[in-house]
Image (cartoon, grey):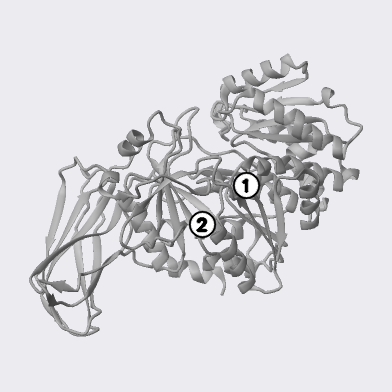
Amino acid sequence: MNVKFIIPILMILFFSCKDVNQKKLNGQDIATVTTSVKLNKGVYKTGENIKADLVFKNDSLISTSIGGITIEIKNISDPADSWSHKVQLDNSFELSKDDEKIISATLLNNLPESLKEEAYGIYLRYNNNDKIVTKYKTFFRVVNDDELTVFDIKTDFVNDVPVYKLDGGMSAEYVIEKSAENLTSGISHSWDVNAPGSGPNHVLGTPNYLEKSVNKTVDFYNKTFGENTEIETVLISSGFPSIPYISNALKAPVLPLHFLVSVNTVKEIRTILETANDNDIASYATLSHDPSVPYAVSWIKLLELPQVYKDFIKQHNVKNIVILGATGTSGGETKAKKIVYDSTSNEEYANRSIYIMYPGTSPDDVKTLDKKIADLKDFKQQDDYIQIADWESGINQKQLDNFSRDAKVVDSSIKVTTITAVDLGRLYALGSYSTLALMHKNKEKFDGVKGVIFNPYLISHPTIEAKKGFVPLLYWQLVGPNFTVYNMENDVFKAVKHFYPETNVKNLKLWLNSTRNFGAVWSATNLKKELTKKGYTNFIENNYTVDEVWDLSDGVESPSELLFKEVNDSYGFQNLKKWSNSLKPLTIKDIEELSEIFGGFQVETK
């Protein structure tokens, strides 16, 4: 089925949350009633009307009476907010066996300007054979025109060159933008910031958040590459720093296996998962805090390929699917406790399950989580800490199995390859290896290695860097500079010497590619000091007082702006595109050889 027909269908889906009554009251059988509240939208602005369908379904063999129906709307982002709104419905009715009753109601007319721009819970209260039932059902969010409820990538054209500008999201959404930069030989920044030197603008949760995110991904690619363009290889992964380089080497766009959302409550994540899973998008979530974002943040993680991904694979006649991630549970941010609530099973990574992450990036994770997640204390967590797949870079066996199966269901002839490592650091290194392997495979179009570019999380321009002869050293800026320099000498240089044995690594240019929002001056300064101690002197430095954000109104100063000017003023982007398109991409066999040579990651093809 063509994806353009699927998206409108998803857009009109209601957002709902279900519950089932108990079957005994004072020892007597009572009807099992399933209820849901289906809002006409998940996000509202001042002046709009909130409408809903209330659904009551009798799933039992006996009849029951329903009455006393009340809807209450309360602020769940800020429990101290005393505002609430109640709607009393006059409906009362009998439900016989398998009977269903739908009541359409307006819950609130003309949303008042005084309402805070936060999340509001919908609570349903009713009598079932004189037993009063009260349940949280779903939520909606009040927003203004400037707030995001799904990531956005704007495409501008400067001198006919596409400029991609990500707003919202984080690493996974970033690799979508970078896939476009790589495959069209354009340019992109990292992301718009919420303040100078800070993190990305937050994407606020709505019930259909996951559907919107997967649809946005496919829509963007179809618009950027063309709806019927054949794509040989697609990469399914999260968004750690080496992914843009691996994507570039394979000439493969990335379909993210998760998306980042900002929330204040567990209730929002529960509803997002229930909405997604009720609409056949199998998923679970990790929920925690990130110092670069003012809200709590959650990765909503796919457990199977959604239909829009499968349609994309079929529509573009994809021949190879590469699934990539870290499988270890002892490194990175893996410490967690599972939320215990009725709709989830005890199975690890069960559909709808929520894991509270304790990343250790706060002096006291518990206090920070309680501060950022308003209702965390209302939910029971399992008693003991467990270790799960890294919340940003990890992949679990269930995902590996399901993604592989789903790709084969699309077309049994698709070659499915998994690239995994227990140690995430080995997958960081694969960014360097794949760049060098691409250069060597097309050595007649490169003039050897000219330098190493120290790219902190998250800056990259793989095509332009390779054209300049620079190999990336990808690092997390909060680790010590001695560790990063060790990786250069004992990993990157080893790989350089393997492919280009005549290279004098001491003469390579060392580009300290930090910015105010990635690493800042302290990271670059510490690296330079460490490198100088070891006798290196050939440095390229940035203006460390600017962000990696495309904004020509304040002058040409960010790395993306400077690279654009450099290419545009020299050989030009049309020549860059011709050159890039002429390169032979790496094959799975090439990646297998890298695994054999350098070790630490596994490649398996089905």
Above or below for 557 versus 340:
above
Q: Residue at x 13, y 67 (%)?
A: 126
The amino acid type found where label 2 is placed reads Lys
Instruction: Identify which residue, 50 or 276, lies in the foreground.
Output: 276
Above or below for 553 versus 375:
above
Q: Residue at x 81, y 26 (%)?
A: 508
Q: Look at mark 1 in the image and give the residue it sits on.
A: 422
Q: Position of residue 333 (x, y in %)?
A: 50, 41
Disc 1 secondary structure class = loop
Sort mark 2 into few (<14), some (14-19) or many (20+) by Cα contacts within 10 Å: some
What label does residue 200 carry, if any? none
Q: Are marks 1 and 2 in contact (CB under 8 Å)?
A: no
Q: Look at mark 2 in the image and give the residue it sits on.
A: 216
First in residue order: circle 1 vs circle 2: 2
Q: Can residue 469 be spotted in the picture? A: no
Q: Is residue 308 left or right of residue 148?
A: right
**Residue 292 location, quadrant:** top left
The amino acid type found where label 1 is placed reads Val
Above or below for 279 versus 457:
below
Given this view, does label 1 or label 2 mark the residue nearer the observer?
Answer: 1
* Total numbered labels: 2
The quadrant of the image that shows the N terminus is: bottom right
Calculate the distance from the C-alpha at mark 1 to the C-alpha at mark 2.
Answer: 31 Å
Q: Position of residue 415 (x, y in %)?
A: 71, 66
**Residue 507 location, quadrant:** top right
Q: Residue at x 63, y 18 (%)?
A: 525
